[in-house]
Image: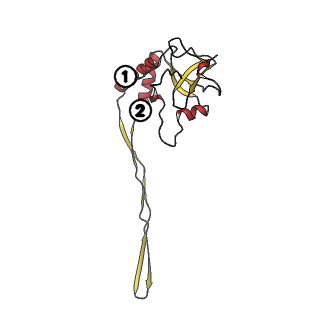
Amino acid sequence: MRSIAGCLAGLVLLAGCAEPTFYDRYKAGAPLQSFPYKAGATGASLTNDITNCEIEAAQRVPQNLASTTTPTYTTPTQTHCNRIGTQVFCNTTGGQTYGGQTTIFDANSGLRSRAQQQCMMRSGYRFLNVPACPDGVRPEALVVARNGGLPQVSAGTCYLVDPSGSWMIGNRT
């Protein structure tokens, strides 16, 4: 399968074992969301523009680490004693503390993401939700730009993914 942006794995973050893969989401018919689109862009030019805009956004909006801590709660302690003959047996329960987890996050990540989108839009991109191609559509049936890049958007624009994760965007013929 011809891939216009095989090196864009960073666009599709696969978090963990329980997360569906890019291919799984494609097979389920999920659209490719907020895809940076510019007619004729190749995988190389798209990757280059994304990297340049990430750098610009990082310079414009530096990281600002902040933290939050969940409230804590300690269960009350209770001691129960029993006398058996001349001996006293006591059992204390409770006293467990819950919560208090600290999470560190970048308070500027949302603003940096918006700065990156602005940069991409200044470079001629717009963000599209590209639908998955219907079942049975083969790569040979998709028309791409002459340079192998992204085609003009039409009602027939869709994306394909194979089980290896290679993908392409084109127009159904």
Image: 150 above or below 66: above
Q: Would you say the residues marked 1 and 2 are in contact, meaning their CB atoms lie under 8 Å apart?
A: no
In the rendered image of this protein, does residue 141 appear above or below residue 109?
above
Instruction: Give percent across and percent down for residue 55.
Output: 36, 24
Horizontal relation, residue 171 to residue 122: left or right: right
Q: In the image, what residue occupies the spot 42% across and 29% down? A: 111
Task: Write down the residue under mark 1.
Answer: 56
Residue drawn 61% across the image and 16% down it: 154
Relative to 130, is 15 on the left or the right? left
- Work out whether mark 1 precedes mark 2 in sequence or the reverse, and give the earlier one: 1
Rendering coords of residue 160 (x, y %):
57, 25
Q: Crowding at label 1, few (<14), some or many (≥20) Cα neighbours within 10 Å?
A: some
Q: Residues within 10 Å of mark 2 (few under 14, many from 20)?
A: some
User: Depth check: 72 or 165 in front?
Assistant: 165
Q: CA distance from mark 1 to mark 2?
A: 14 Å
**Dot 1 lies on which element?**
helix
Q: Amino acid at mark 2?
A: Ser
Which residue is disc 2 drawn over?
A: 109
**Image quarter of residue 134:** top right
Helix, strand or loop at mark 2: helix
Instruction: Give residue 110's quadrant in the image.
Output: top left
Q: Give x and y (percent) for residue 67.
A: 37, 42
Which kind of residue does numbered mark 1 sit on? Glu
